[in-house]
Image: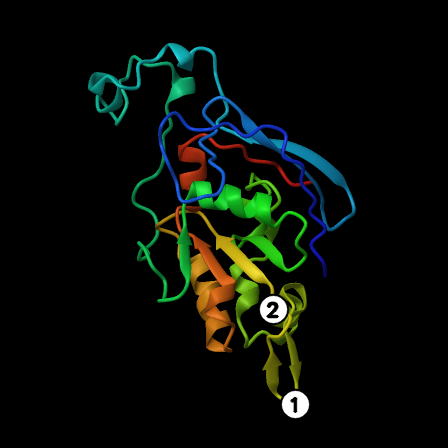
Amino acid sequence: MKNKISVALVALMLSGGMSFTFAKEYNLKKGGINIEYTDYNGESFSVDIQRRPDSICAQVNGGDPNNVWGGDYANEALPKECTKTFLTTMGKLTPMNMEEGIETYGELEVIEFIEKNANNENALLVDARMEPWYKKGTIPTAINISFKKFDPKNAIDFEFVLDTIGVYKEDGKYDFSEAKTLLMFCNGAWCPQSSWAMENLRSIGYPKEKLKWYRAGMYGWKLVNLTTVIPK
């Protein structure tokens, strides 16, 4: 299977005095990046990855500690459009680093990965959650491969995974010469699904330099109000 994502950079806003280690800066404070891509069904899409603005929120003083730290981590008097509520006691906390040699990404690195690898058939953004979660919203350009399919004991599902990520097996040995670079995520720091999938890949010898991990996942992505898409 091939990743047919194609991208056009429409707007790239520079940060106000902040510096990052990227060749380009992606703070997305006043603009966004337009992504045009084709999914596995051959359908074309265009989406802006941005910090979704709300006019009423522009009036909120985010530098006022009475707003940021009042009530449930946000002053109860603030407009609901400007605050978020999450469950906080789910799952099992994951470490910041999965394994030495596997990079842990933040939101800006994820955006950079999407742009840099949009025309690269050898790199995939993988949502490792189960399909019902994926269908409620995901990061633009992500494909869904449920963590359950990464179990080598389930031959049929695992064969599908290997075919998707460019790994071949012959005479009982895995060939990683065409293995794709994978940036994987699930729900958040408390969600072990993506790390479990990656551990299964590592158990068969998948090159660690071709594995990247967005630990914050969908909760982290939504926490900073970045664009999500509903898969068809």
Of 22 and 38, the residue lying toward us = 22
| View extreme (right): residue | 42
Of residue 28 and residue 159, the one placed in the foreground of this image is 28
User: Which residue is pictured at 35% across the width and 50% down the height?
Assistant: 190
Q: Amino acid at mark 2?
A: Ala
Residue pictured at 29% horizontal, 45% vertical: 89
User: Where on the picture, by quarter, is residue 75?
Assistant: top left
Please state if 134 lies on the left or on the right of 86 as rendered.
Answer: right
Between 215 and 128, which is closer to the camera in this rendering? Answer: 215
With 205 as the anchor, is 33 left or right in this view?
A: right
Left-right relation of 1 to 122: right
Q: Residue at x 26, y 23 (%)?
A: 68
* Residue 28 in view of the camera: yes
Q: How many marks?
A: 2
Dot 2 and dot 1 residues touching (CB under 8 Å)? no
- The x, y position of residue 206, in whole percent, is 52, 73
Residue receiving disc 2? 179
Numbered disc 1: secondary structure = loop
The crowding category of the residue bearing disc 1, from other C-alpha atoms within 10 Å (few below 14, some 14 to 19, many at least 20), is few
Name the quadrant containing residue 174. Answer: bottom right
| Label 2 neighbour load within 10 Å: few <14, some 14-19, many 20+ | some
Q: Circle 1 is placed at which residue position?
A: 171
Q: Whole-percent x and y of residue 179?
A: 61, 69
Between the residue at mark 2 and the residue at mark 1, the CA separation in whole angstroms equals: 18 Å
Query: Image quadrant for the C terminus?
Result: top right
Residue type pointed to by label 1: Asp
Residue at left 45%, top 35%? Answer: 222
Q: Which mark is residue 142?
A: none
Q: Return the x and y of residue 203 as percentages of the image width and height.
A: 46, 76
Camera sees residue 218: no
Callout 2 secondary element: loop
Q: Position of residue 189 (x, y in %)?
A: 35, 49
